[in-house]
């Protein structure tokens, strides 16, 4: 936004840094897609049995890569919501004499988009709680034989709830 005829030096980060943050989130999405594609197209049998009779034990079924990809993607989705809420908040305060407070024709008498902002803030808060990484919350199962589990199903489920 131009500040030639106003007393502001610059806009808040949520306005100025939008393209940088969007690039970061797009990069995270693309990286997550690559990780998931690599994992779903790889061998995950355990043990691996080769034509020559050789048998190799493998832990490639472990979904740590997918779990971490979903966690970081969930964080990126949460950040999209957070920066969007900040931009909406910016306009709720009114912008000079161009945009009235709450984007209402009669601020104080009318609430304008205030409830839309309240809803956005609630959703941004919910997304922040859903972005806590599941991959760091390994719980031992199967009498300790599965002592470091990926929690990938929960990580992916959270990420889709966060969307």
Image (cartoon, grey):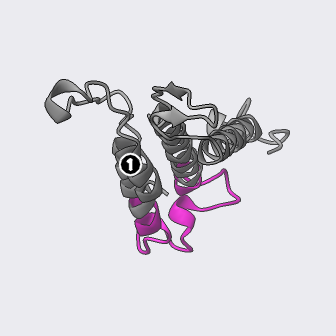
Q: Residue at x 68, y 56 (%)?
A: 97
Residue 5 seen in render: yes
Residue 98 highlighted magenta (yes or no): yes
Q: Number of numbered discs present?
A: 1
Secondary structure mostly seen in magenta is: loop
Residue matched to label 1? 153
Q: Could you say which is closer to the camera, residue 50 or residue 10?
A: 50
Q: Residue at x 63, y 41 (%)?
A: 42
With respect to residue 150, does 158 lie above or below?
A: below
Residue 44 position, x and y percent, is 52, 40
Q: Is residue 52 above or below residue 158?
A: above
Q: Is residue 94 above or below residue 8?
A: below
Q: Which quarter shows the N terminus? A: top right
Residue at x 66%, y 41% (from the top left corner):
38
Identify the residue at horizontal 66%, vertical 44% (top origin): 29
Neighbour tally class for label 1: few under 14, some 14-19, many 20 plus, Cα within 10 Å? some
Q: Nearer the viewer, residue 44 or 24?
A: 44
Name the spot of residue 60 as percent of width and height, x first: 50, 32
Was residue 107 drawn as part of the magenta stretch in this picture? yes
Tell me where the magenta segment starts and ends, as one range.
Answer: 89-118
Instruction: In this rendered view, identify the residue nearer to me: 14 or 137.
Output: 137
């Amino acid at each position: 936004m131009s500040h030639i005829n106003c007393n502001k030096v610059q806009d808040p980060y949520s306005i100025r840094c939008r393209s940088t943050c969007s690039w970061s989130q797009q990069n995270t999405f693309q990286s997550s897609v690559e990780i998931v594609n690599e994992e779903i197209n790889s061998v995950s049998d355990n043990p691996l049995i080769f034509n020559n009779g050789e048998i190799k034990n493998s832990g490639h079924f472990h979904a740590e890569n997918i779990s971490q990809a979903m966690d970081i993607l969930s964080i990126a989705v949460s950040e999209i919501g957070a920066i969007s809420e900040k931009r909406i908040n910016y306009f709720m305060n009114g912008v000079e004499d161009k945009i009235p407070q709450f984007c209402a024709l009669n601020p104080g008498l009318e609430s304008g988009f205030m409830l839309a902002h309240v809803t956005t803030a609630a959703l941004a808060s919910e997304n922040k709680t859903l972005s806590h990484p599941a991959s760091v919350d390994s719980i031992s199962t199967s009498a300790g034989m599965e002592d470091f589990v990926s929690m990938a199903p929960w990580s992916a489920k959270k990420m889709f709830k966060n969307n």
